[in-house]
Amino acid sequence: MNDNQYAGKYALLYTLLIAVILLIPFFFYFIYMKNLHSVKNEILLKEKAFLVIKAMNEYNQNKKYFEYPRFKTFQSGLYDKKFEPVFSLLEYKIEDFKEGYHLDGNNAYLILKLPKNRYFGARYLIIKNTISFANLYKKVTIILFSIVMLVFILSIFFLNRFARPFKTMNEKLDNFIKDSMHEINTPLSIINVNIDLYNRKNPTNKYMQRMKAATKVLSNIYNDMDYLIKHDRLKFEKEPINMKIFLTNRIDYFSEVARMKNLVIKTNIIDGLVINMNPQQLQRVIDNNISNAIKYSFEDNIIEVDVYKQDDLYCMSFKDYGVGIDDVEKIFSRYYREDTQKGGFGIGLNIVRSIIVDVGIEVEIISELKKGTTFIYKFPQALQLN
């Protein structure tokens, strides 16, 4: 995850948290504004009701008829004491005839009691309109959205500002690691070459064997670090790989390391199995499994490396007779180490997991404490070439 994704992710989480916190006061604000809107509407209904009453008060009995006031967005009517209409323009069925202001969903109406025997025998004036909270919803939504967007933008800005010193430090640390890796590779190569030259001209020397084994362990660590640094920038092209030839080559490479603990690597590899995979990625999977098998095996023992077919899948297994794994679920986590006394950085199996997830290889782990562990990798048919 790059810095921008990191900042965006946590800015979004922070913004969501702020939004959730704001929902509570905004809820009460909405209720308050809704009540305020309702009060304003009640006052408006009362104004229209007074206009009707005023028109009735100004009515001259000598006129042949009374022209009842009509409003564009208001409906009203006169009712007797039994709430039977004397004259009504209402299209809405009144359910509650209690005097006062009533709100039924979006329908608002006001019931006023009239003086007895004064207004055409009517005892009640009812005036009604439709009240809408759409503008209120819109207003609250715009305010909340504006605040959320402002918080999100400010969060990204301040997260980037606060992270800038750490970003600079990380860049320097990355450059330092890259330079260190380059500096380590050169003397390591020189040591390997000179050990090989010495072994060609001189009898077998156990001290030289130990030095050679140590350099191979260092080389494996170097290759893990190099892969970890570069894998995001490289494109790993696939090519046909003969499993037996490739795996045998890697086992031969680690044979000197295994001999330091009097370990024998036994193999049972089916001939002719070819997969389509990147050699560097396959090497990281194999090297880390062999290296771990050697590291965690008991001395004077064997390591079994097998390649076989099972249910139309190619399977590659590494079995050691050693300390076993206490927590299988954590074994692929970066920097996690079951036994800190054994050394290492806890990145090997994490690299393995990233590779097998990327190419679709399944892994099964069978382990028992103080008896050993078996890693079984199942290659999907998409990677099989024959």
Image (cartoon, helix red, strand yellow):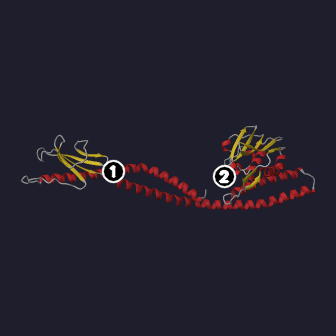
Tell me the kind of residue under disc 1. Lys
Q: Quadrant of residue 140?
A: bottom left
In this rendering, the label closer to the viewer, 1 or 2: 2
Residue at position x 46%, y 52% from top? 19
Q: Residues within 10 Å of mark 1 (few under 14, many from 20)?
A: some
x and y percent of residue 362 in the render? 68, 46
Tell me the kind of residue under disc 2. Asp
x and y percent of residue 187 in the render? 80, 60
Q: Residues within 10 Å of mark 2 (few under 14, many from 20)?
A: few
How many numbered circles does the render carry?
Answer: 2
x and y percent of residue 276 in the render? 72, 53
> Do we see residue 350 in this rendering?
no
The residue under label 1 is: 34
Identify which residue, 357 or 170, lies in the foreground: 357
The residue under label 2 is: 358
Identify which residue, 18 or 232, lies in the foreground: 232
Report whether 67 appears left or right of 131: left
Residue at position x 81%, y 59% from top? 189
Query: Upstream in the sequence, badge 1 or badge 2?
Result: 1
Number of the label disc, if any, that sits on residue 309: none
Identify which residue, 74 or 297, lies in the foreground: 74
